[in-house]
Image: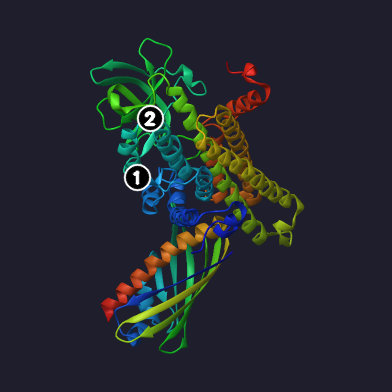
Amino acid sequence: METLFQSSVDEVDRLVGLGEEEKVLLQDADAAAAELLVSEFEKYVERKYNPEIAGVLRRHNLMGVPIATKYGGRGARQLAEALFLERMGQTGMGVITLADVHMCLGSLAVQDWGSEEQKDRYLPAAAKGDVLFAYGLTEPEAGSDPGSLKTSYAREGAGFRLTGSKYLISNGSIATNMIVFARPQGDSKGVTAFLVDTKREGFSVDMRLEEKIGLFTSDTSLVSLDGAFVPKEDVLGEEGKGLSVAYSALLNGRIGIASGCLGVMEDCLNQVRERTTSRVQHGKEIARHQLIQKHVAFIESSLEACRWLVYRAALKKDEFGGSPRDVSLRSEADRLSAVAKYMSSRCAFESADRAVQCFGGFGYSIMSPVAKHFLDSRVARIYEGTDEIMELKIASSVLGKQFEAYR
Amino acid sequence: MQLHLDGSTVINAPQSKVYALLTDPNFIAKTLPDAEDVHVLDAQSLEARMKLRVAVVSSALKVKMSISKTAPGSKATLVAEGTGSGSAMKITSVFDLAGGSSTTMGWSADAEITGVMAGLGSSLLKGFATKKVAEIFEGITKAIEEAA
């Protein structure tokens, strides 16, 4: 099958060493990416959510990539998951956002923190795509400081009642289940994670946010919980330890976003190469102009540099997965995921900007594929940890905990 | 920008009938999707104004098509050249027929696209073209089977 991707699966195999199942995973990713390309672009131009994403991923058995095989997933290690998302990233950050939230923030949080009963109940359905996860941490008044969240819970009978709002929630209006973080009513400490069934009474989608800079094909919503009941069986992790669940999910998610950004850079490079070697101005292909070559060199160097950061973070996360009690490994994986996300999201956005420049006037039209990346990749510098929060994390990892600027 | 597409389709009609219809400009004129002002010029050619839609944006191209019987009875070539809405295209399609009571039609299309449309890039254009070609062949197959 012809792929969109520049590096063939065999080339990736030679670089990182892939198992047979991992090669099949990447081939499936290429097939899904090719299938999604047209609908993604059409919906982006229409500024609409793309309802085909989950269906295509389901058809190619790509909804449970990191879920263990005993729960019906593909059991991909973090590196294989990163390579999968890198290939899907060529279709744009809309696809990546749905996949990252469902798999990295949702399914992996259940796999890492859930009870056996919860894993049996949620993961096989999540792997099939019958369960679609959203991640409800951000609130209108709590973004980079999740410790200040206001959504609260109160005990009632065999469970809890949750009240509050969650804002800018990817998959918010399409998810079947949302991991919601809330604190005990009247208590400023002890955030707990809950697996909330979005069909429960008291859960509502207040707004689908369509007035965004980009990422139109991804669902972004404001949801409300008005005394929504959650049975005690759906507390994820220990009560009061929800922020640990939140931060570990974000570690996975950041590698996912960074991986998608690699795909964005790859597509920018492919588009720029094609455009600049066929567009003739001043009697020659514009690729022969040195200032265009400067942009090409930037995108290529960014892609290669960021690949190393993302693969390294993924390998460290795999190492941590083998020794989950090793605090120093966890902290190293956390640092490397922040570095990978910080650099890849910035480089993806700048690569898209330079690609727009290479496309000239046509690049300024939203009808150009590079304009889509320019608009869609901007959010990668904000969600799952802003540039500034990543910088603070990275700096404190070098300077020491006593220098944590956000404390 | 250059694009290549190929494929095959099975038509439930005898090869001779398929060939006769495929090389008849009057028949082609009836099967073209999103075409307006279709005029058959002579026994080998026709022209039409065709609408091409990408998401919410549609362009109109004035297209001239010429059919040649490369190997009478089994092979034909259709060249479509058009301009409009800041774009120009030339598509050379080759049809290769084989079979008896039903016909397998192998086809290939090589397109050269310039102007605004080329800015979409080959991967996207190929995606849209694949969708459009499937629609065209569905129409042709249905029309031939109805006529046979």
From the top left corner, tell me how far across and down residue A87 is, in percent.
52, 51
* Residue drawn 60% across the image and 34% down it: A336
Which residue is denoted by mark 2 in the rendering? A179
Mark 1 or mark 2, which has the lower sequence index?
A: 1
Examine the rendered structure and indicate whether residue A321 appears above or below residue A27.
Answer: above
Q: Position of residue A278 (x, y in %)?
A: 65, 61
Image position of A212 with respect to A157: above or below: below
> What's the residue at 73%, 62% (across, down)?
A283
Labels 1 and 2 in the same subunit = yes
Q: What is the secondary structure assignment of the residue under circle 2?
A: strand
Residue B105, picture quadrant: bottom left
Horizontal and vertical percent position of residue A223: 36, 28
Residue indicated by mark 1:
A129
Q: Can residue B73 be seen from the camera position used here?
A: yes
**Left or right, residue A108 beside residue A204:** right
For the C terminus of chain B, the image quarter is bottom left
Secondary structure, mark 1, is loop
Residue A196's spot in the image, x, y percent?
A: 32, 29
Q: Nearer the viewer, residue A381 or A340?
A: A340
Residue A351 visible? no
- In the rendered view, would you say A249 is above or below A406? below
Chain letter of the residue beneath label 2 in the structure image: A
Q: Is residue A76 left or right of residue A335?
A: left
Quarter-of-image position of residue A305: top right
Q: Residue at x 62, y 24 (%)?
A: A392
* Residue at the far top in the pictured view: A186
Q: Amino acid at mark 2?
A: Ile
Q: Amino acid at mark 1?
A: Gly
Judged from this view, the residue extending furthest toward the left is A157
Q: Badge 2: few (under 14), some or many (20 or more) residues near its Cα, within 10 Å? A: many
Subunit under mark 1? A
Q: Is residue B11 left or right of residue A340?
A: left
